[in-house]
Image (spheres, helix red, strand yellow):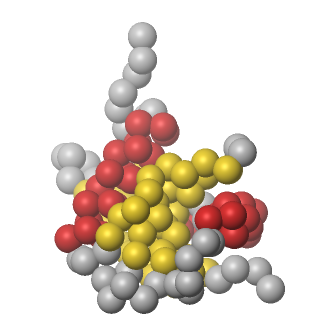
Amino acid sequence: MSRRGAGDTRWTGRRGERIAAAWLRRRGYRITGRNILRGSREVDLLGTSPDGRQQVVVEVKAGSGTFEQLAGRVDAGKRRRICSVAAGLQGGTLPVRFDVVLVRFMAGGGWDVRHLPGAFGAPS
């Protein structure tokens, strides 16, 4: 039997990605891809900035911790893996920006979102 709830990290992650995508769309972002795989590596969301001038690669972290705890889960290794997937996606002429969206689930069923545009850059 599959467990679906706050303790199930895959379910929590997918729910966070859905919330983040909807949150970004409401702010004018165009979501062009979700859960893009390159080998065993994944980009959560791919989109275009509201002004249409940047391709935006989005890492989503969701959970019941603080925003600082969630942001801390996007460590140097995770950033390198995201950048390596993004390098394989760059076919257009738009510059790429790496954002992080944090979705914090609160007791009682609500959530709060924090968007960190340009949270990190591609390694030199």
| Image quarter of the N terminus | top left
Residue 11 vertical placement versus 82 (above, below) = above
At which x and y percent is residue 38?
A: 67, 50
| Image quarter of the C terminus | bottom right
Residue shown at the point (26%, 68%) measured from the top left = 25
Please say whether residue 12 is visible from this viewpoint.
yes
Would you identify the image quadrant in which residue 49 lies?
bottom left
Q: Nearer the viewer, residue 91 or 121?
A: 91
At which x and y percent is residue 6?
A: 37, 38
Residue 107 vertical placement versus 73 (above, below) = above
Residue 26 vertical placement versus 50 (above, below) = above
Would you identify the image quadrant in which residue 79 lies?
bottom right
Residue shown at the point (32%, 51%) measured from the top left = 18
Residue lying at the far top of the rendered structure = 1
Residue shown at the point (45%, 33%) measured from the top left = 8
At which x and y percent is residue 54?
A: 47, 84
Residue shown at the point (36%, 64%) measured from the top left = 31
At which x and y percent is residue 44?
A: 50, 56
Please say whether residue 75 is visible from this viewpoint.
no
Q: Image check: 20 left or right of 77?
A: left
Q: Image check: 40 left or right of 42?
A: right
Q: Nearer the viewer, residue 7 or 88?
A: 88
Residue lying at the far right of the rendered structure = 124
Total numbered labels:
0
Residue 109 vertical placement versus 92 (above, below) = above
